[in-house]
Image: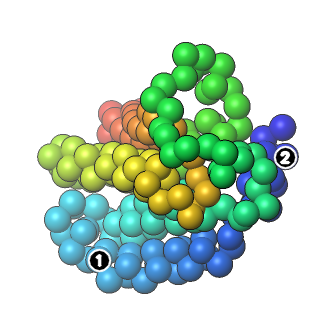
Amino acid sequence: IAHAWIDRQLAFWSPAWVLGGCALTVAVALVVHTPLARWSRLPAWASIAYVVFLGVALAWTLSPRSPGDHYFDFDAVRPRCTAWRRDMLTALSTPEWQFNLGLLAPVGAVTALARRAAARRRLLLIAAVPPILVEGAQFAVRSLNRVCEGTDIVTNWLGLLAGYALVRAAVRIGRSGP
C-alpha cells in the first residue's frame, strides 16, 4: 500500500519544482558546508548531508501539486490548517504519515554526529523550524495546491528525534567498545 501511495504522489507533483529544488539544495550545500562544518563540528561530508537532506525535504514538501490531483477539491476548501487528528495512532500507520516520519529522520541522524552537545542542540533546533514554515506556506500560498496539517509538524519532529536517537545510541555503543 505504501508503494501505491508514493506512486500516486509522484504522479501529481511537479517534477521540475522538485528537481529544481534539489539542484538548488546541492549548490547551497557546496557553498555552506565548510562554515557549517566548522560551526557545528560536523565532518565535512555530514555538513553536506545535513543541508542536502533538509533541502530535499523542503523541495518535496513545497513543490506545487498538479491541478489534476483530485485528492482535495481546493476550490471548495477554504484555506485552513487542521490542528490535530484525534486518531493519531491510526494516522501514524498510513503511508503519508510514515513518509512524514522518514522525511527528517536522516537530518536527525546526521545531527547526532556533531561532536559537541551544544552544536547538536542548535542543529536540532534549526531542523525543527522548517516543518512549521512549510505548513504555514501550505496554508498561505493557495497556488501550491497543498493542505496544511498540524500533525505533519509533529510527525516530522518525531522522525527528526528518532533519527537522532538511533545514531546517538549507536555512537555511545561504539564508544563503549566490545
Spatial CA span between label 1 and label 2: 37 Å
Tell me the quarter of the image containing the N terminus.
Answer: top right
For disc 1, the marked residue is 32
Determine whether, in the image, residue 88 is placed left or right of residue 65: left
Residue depth check, mark 1 versus mark 2: number of the one nearer the observer: 2
Q: Is residue 75 above or below residue 12?
A: above
Q: Is residue 19 above or below residue 60?
A: below
Determine whether, in the image, residue 140 is placed left or right of residue 145: left
Tell me where residue 163 appears, x and y as whole percent. 46, 41
Tell me where residue 160 appears, x and y as whole percent. 42, 42
Circle 1: is it few (<14), some (14-19), or many (20+) Cα within 10 Å? Answer: few
Q: Secondary structure at mark 1?
A: helix
Q: Nearer the viewer, residue 140 or 132?
A: 140
Disc 1 to disc 2: CB gap under 8 Å = no
Q: Is residue 38 above or below residue 177?
A: below
Q: Residue at x 45, y 74 (%)?
A: 25
Q: Residue at x 51, y 46 (%)?
A: 79
Q: Which of the marked residues, 1 or 2, is nearer the chain's N terminus?
A: 2
Tell me where residue 15 appears, x and y as whole percent. 69, 73
Q: Quadrant of residue 42?
A: bottom left
Q: Quadrant of residue 85?
A: top right
The image shows a total of numbered marks equal to 2
Q: Residue at x 78, y 41 (%)?
A: 2
Q: Nearer the viewer, residue 38 or 9?
A: 9
Specify whether residue 155 is in view. Answer: no
Q: Secondary structure at mark 2?
A: helix
Determine whether, in the image, residue 89 is placed left or right of residue 127: right
Kindly identify the amino acid type of the residue bearing the numbered disc 1. Val
Kindly identify the amino acid type of the residue bearing the numbered disc 2. Ala
For disc 2, the marked residue is 4
Tell me where residue 74 appears, x and y as whole percent. 65, 50
